[in-house]
Image: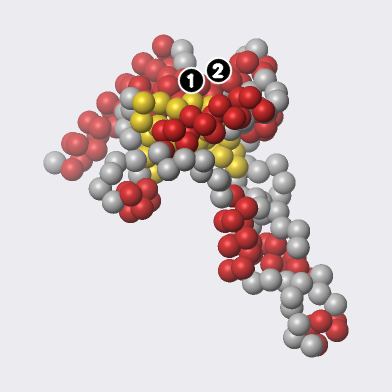
């Protein structure tokens, strides 16, 4: 069975159902249209990465070394950086950078961050996930993370370094970086400041944004009191 790992299991399931013959439908034989739970498991298995060593740092270093050695292109592999302080990894590929570049000036770019999901998985350990998300070029597929950053800290320098690394990769391919007009994120002040610093890098924009945050805080504070 051919299964596209980036396609929504529900969409693929419905597509398979629509391709069933009348004989298959009447016989209640739907082997050609596997259930969504089965498709989710296949998608999960397809995305699993073989871990060469039990030690996390050693495994990441080995994966990075293999990608740099065997992958081709100006930007090699997916694991671009392994950070020690704060601990973290930066992920993107040449393909995702090119997709981002082709969509940045016309489509919505979303910079997202989450810590609650990872906190549940890891217990009390602090871990945050940041992503630059774009619309998938193929309709019906999940939105695409053009770049991902997993780190143990949530501050402006850390996020800024992630955004700077991605912008530098785009500059490597195109000699300039795109400044997306429709750029969205949640209400995190840390995320917004980091975003302004490296997507709207002029000092004029930064001062204007800081002034806006101060005015909003005063307005909300006065209304609450």
Query: Could you say which is closer to the camera, residue 154 or residue 225?
Result: 154
Above or below residue 16? Residue 176 is above
Rendered residue at 58%/69% (across/down): 37
Rendered residue at 59%/30% (across/down): 66
Q: Are marks 1 and 2 in contact (CB under 8 Å)?
A: yes
What secondary structure is found at the residue carrying circle 2?
A: helix
| Image spot of residue 206 (x, y percent) | 39, 17
221 sits to left or right of 91? left
Q: Which quadrant, please, contains the C terminus?
A: top left
Question: Mark 1 to mark 2: distance in Å?
Answer: 6 Å
Above or below residue 114? Residue 196 is above
Which residue does the numbered mark 1 point to in the structure image?
Answer: 164
Rendered residue at 60%/42% (across/down): 144
Q: Please tell me in which quadrant of the rendered image residue 191 appears.
A: top left
Asked whether residue 81 appears in the rendered view, the answer is yes
| Image spot of residue 81 (x, y percent) | 49, 26
What secondary structure is found at the residue carrying circle 1?
A: helix
| Image spot of residue 13 (x, y percent) | 69, 67
Which residue does the numbered mark 2 point to in the structure image?
Answer: 168
- Type of colouring: secondary structure
Asked whether residue 183 appears in the rendered view, the answer is no
| Image spot of residue 203 (x, y percent) | 41, 11
Above or below residue 14? Residue 107 is above
Rendered residue at 85%/82% (across/down): 22
């Amino acid at each position: 069975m051919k299964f596209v790992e980036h396609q929504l299991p529900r969409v693929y399931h419905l597509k398979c159902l629509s391709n069933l013959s009348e004989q298959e439908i009447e016989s209640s034989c739907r082997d050609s249209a596997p259930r969504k739970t089965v498709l989710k498991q296949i998608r999960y298995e397809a995305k699993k990465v073989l871990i060469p060593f039990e030690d996390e740092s050693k495994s990441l270093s080995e994966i990075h070394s293999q990608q740099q050695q065997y992958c081709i292109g100006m930007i090699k592999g997916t694991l671009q950086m392994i950070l020690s302080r704060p601990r973290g990894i930066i992920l993107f590929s040449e393909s995702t950078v090119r997709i981002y570049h082709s969509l940045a000036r016309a489509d919505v770019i979303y910079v997202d961050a989450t810590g609650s999901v990872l906190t549940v998985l890891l217990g009390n350990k602090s871990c945050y996930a940041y992503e630059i998300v774009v619309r998938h070029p193929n309709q019906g597929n999940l939105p695409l993370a053009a770049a991902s950053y997993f780190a143990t800290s949530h501050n402006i320098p850390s996020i800024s370094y992630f955004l700077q690394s991605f912008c530098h990769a785009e500059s490597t391919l195109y000699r300039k970086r795109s400044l997306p007009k429709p750029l969205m994120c949640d209400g995190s002040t840390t995320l917004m400041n980091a975003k302004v610093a490296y997507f709207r890098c002029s000092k004029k924009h930064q001062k204007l944004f800081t002034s806006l945050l101060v005015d909003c805080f005063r307005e909300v504070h006065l209304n609450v009191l």
